[in-house]
Image (cartoon, rainbow, N blue to C red):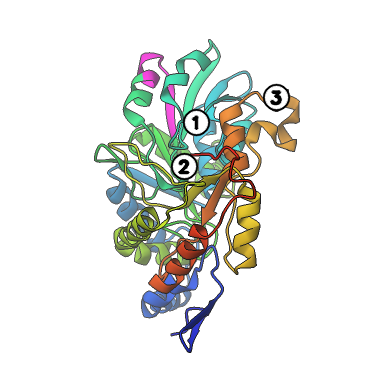
Amino acid sequence: MNWGFERERGIVNMTIKCNVLDRQFQMHQSEYEEAALRVLRSGWYVLGNEVAAFEEEFAAYTGRKYCVGLNSGLDALIMSVRALGIGEGDEVIVQSNTYIATVLGITENKATPVFVEPDEYFNMDAEKIEQAITPKTRAIMVTHLYGQASNMEPIARIAKKHHLELLEDCAQSHGACFEGKMTGSFGISGCFSFYPTKNLGAFGDAGAVVTDDEGLADELRMMRNYGSRVRYYNEIEGLNSRLDELQAAFLRIKLKYVDNLNSERRALALAYDTGIKNDKIALPKVRPGADNIWHQYVVRCGERDRLRQYLQENDIQTQIHYPIPPHLAECYRHLGYKKGDFPIAERYADEVLSLPIYTGMTGAEQDYVIEKLNSFSLMNSERENCV
């Protein structure tokens, strides 16, 4: 099988993409095709047996009682906040370097995001949470960024102490644990995205909420289906946010293999850890007690943009997660933040770079990336690096 590179007379000529999605499909192609035909032949395409089965299986995988399948991870965030009655006049604490979707889950409900800085592991700094709490604070929304579990023991303790709801954005942490407990099982709700690039990715948009709260699960089931338990009898103002049968069938297959897929990413991350030897490039750290399923392998460099250009010139694709922190996003100008308000998040935005990491990445491909990273040098060797 051609993985997009060729060897000719001992010379490696390859283009490395940041992500390659079809390889994991090819690993279990016959199962996916059989599932597609099963759904197509069933004549039932929305909220049927496949969704019910996936919800049961994913709840069991995360160690929670209930799972509600939805259209996307963003809807999981928005609907969790809404179902808890959090809205205008309320504040939700969120980290300042997260993806915009985490914050949209708050602002789409007219609540106010209150940002705190990340720690050295790119996740919410638990030591900065209490100083951000006000009488208006209703919840803490934690993001397990890049696949690493956040520092959940102190965060859960703070939430309990101040009688705050704890919500988890698990869009990048399928299967990651903190002290042996899986992400998504600490707060009242764990919000998951199954976007195709995720470690547990569908073949289109999909998401879910997991919870132990029966009332919350029931509310979310109504909300996703126009606010009704029984068709045409609408009890609340709802949405159309339903996981479809086809995506649920695909997710059931991938769920069987997700731990193996995560193990493969851990092996790839270890190869980067041991192979990259360039003191101008800071490697990611993993917190003791935290697990990382390496949704992204994110390095830092003081001349990130030049490093990215250099890699591009050598046919290596990278991404920036994320170039603009939410408090400086154009859509949130009305919140009144300015550059310098959250310097750690802003520094990360200037320095982070996500390297290629994906299911089926070959040793030759990764060796080529490592070789080019090790041969990169800064324009001025006396520049302060980011290590």
Q: Are marks 2 and 1 in contact (CB under 8 Å)?
A: yes
- Residue 288 higher or lower than 208, as above or below: above
Q: Looking at this rendering, what residue extends furthest in the top direction?
A: 135
**Residue 272 belongs to magenta span:** no
> What segment is highlighted magenta in the picture?
158-167
Q: Amino acid at mark 2?
A: Leu
Query: Within the image, what quadrant is residue 101 found in?
Result: top right
Question: Residue 304, image x and y in percent?
Answer: 61, 48
Q: Are marks 3 and 1 in contact (CB under 8 Å)?
A: no
Q: Earlier in the sequence, mark 3 or mark 1?
A: 1
Write the residue at 37% across / 64% down.
Answer: 254
Q: Amino acid at mark 1?
A: Pro
Q: Earlier in the sequence, mark 3 or mark 2?
A: 2
How many C-alpha atoms fall within 10 Å of the one at disc 3: few (<14), some, or many (≥20)? some
Disc assigned to residue 256: none
Question: Residue 239, image x and y in percent?
Answer: 59, 44
Total count of labels: 3
Q: Secondary structure at mark 1?
A: loop
Write the residue at 42% across / 28% down.
Answer: 166
Q: CA distance from mark 2 to mark 1?
A: 10 Å
Q: CA distance from mark 3 to mark 1?
A: 17 Å
Q: Relative to residue 100, is residue 149 drawn left or right?
A: left
Between 299 and 25, which is closer to the camera in this rendering? 299
Q: Relative to residue 239, is residue 186 drawn left or right?
A: left
Question: Residue 277, image x and y in percent?
Answer: 42, 53
Disc 1 designates what residue? 118
Q: Secondary structure at mark 3?
A: loop
**Residue 166 belongs to magenta span:** yes
Disc 2 designates what residue? 145
Disc assigned to residue 337: 3
Q: Secondary structure at mark 2?
A: helix
